[in-house]
Amino acid sequence: MAEGRDFDLRALGDAVRRARVERGLTVESLGHASGVSTGSISQLERGQGNPAFLTLRRLAEALGLPVAHFVQGPPSAGMVVRADERKRLHLPDTDLVYELLTPSLQGKLEVLRTRIPPGWSNESKPFMHEGEECVHLLSGCLEVVIGTEQYELREGDSITYDASQPHWYRNGTEGTALILGAVTPPSF
């Protein structure tokens, strides 16, 4: 299967700067609203550094945008998303890769293909958003925690849950886990 385009820090920085300027925010006011240091924002806008997913999420929330606004890829025409044209976000600091399988986030459904590297966990910063989520493990093993309940997923397993509960994943293995996730309404 073809991979999507690689992450481009300069394009990401340009997208953050454009969104900030369109909203009439200074680097300082965006830093205050997001809890991200002005130095980190400035560095990111210049196409430097390795932003963490949490940093992108905080900036997106402060700008009133979905994180997917920063995902790269050509606009999808119609209903088909070609494997080599997926909008893709590759976070080089963690090697976590998100690929948007739906043409956009303007509909009622978001479907993501996510590559979770060995050792990755977001236990310290659980996800929490509106809606219902279903995760299907395509390959590998993955620990999924919803609220206080822990589940071990093996290849072929799926889990569906209320995404407004804190939820997090851990890949405690030496192999990559590949998941297919569907969320309604879109939250990325």
Image (spheres, grey):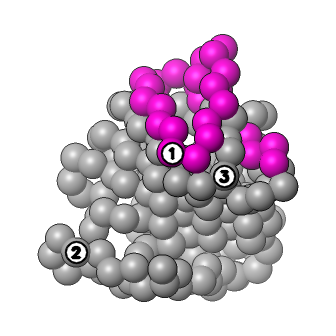
Say which of 151 and 43 sits in front.
151
Image quadrant assignment for residue 37: bottom right
Q: From the image, tell me which residue sits under label 2.
A: 80
Secondary structure under tag 2 reads loop
Q: CA distance from mark 2 to mark 3?
A: 27 Å
Neighbourhood count class around disc 2 (C-alpha, 10 Å): few under 14, some 14–19, many 20 upward: few
68 drawn magenta = no
In the shown orientation, is residue 13 left or right of residue 129? right
9 lies left or right of 4: right
The residue positioned 31% from the left and 58% from the top of the image is 105
* Disc 3 element: loop
Please state the horizontal and vertical placement of residue 121, each as a whole percent of the image: 76, 43
Q: Earlier in the sequence, mark 2 or mark 1?
A: 2
Report the residue marked by disc 3: 140
Observer-nearest of 131 and 178: 178
* Res 38 visible: no
Residue found at x 33% / y 81%: 82
Q: Position of residue 22 (x, y in %)?
A: 41, 68
Amino acid of disc 2: Val
Marks 2 and 1: CB-CB under 8 Å? no
Residues at marks 1 and 3, CA–CA distance in whole angstroms? 9 Å
The span picked out in magenta is 145-173
Displayed quadrant of residue 168: top right
Pointer 1 local density, CA inside 10 Å: few below 14, some 14–19, many at least 20: few
Give the residue drawn at x 81%, y 43%: 172
Q: Find disc 1 in the rendering and name its residue.
A: 156
Q: Residue at x 48, y 60 (%)?
A: 113
Considering only order in the chain, which callout, 3 or 1, is on the residue closer to the N terminus?
Answer: 3
Inter-mark Cα distance, 2 to 1: 25 Å
| Image coordinates for residue 63, horizontal then vertical, percent | 48, 54
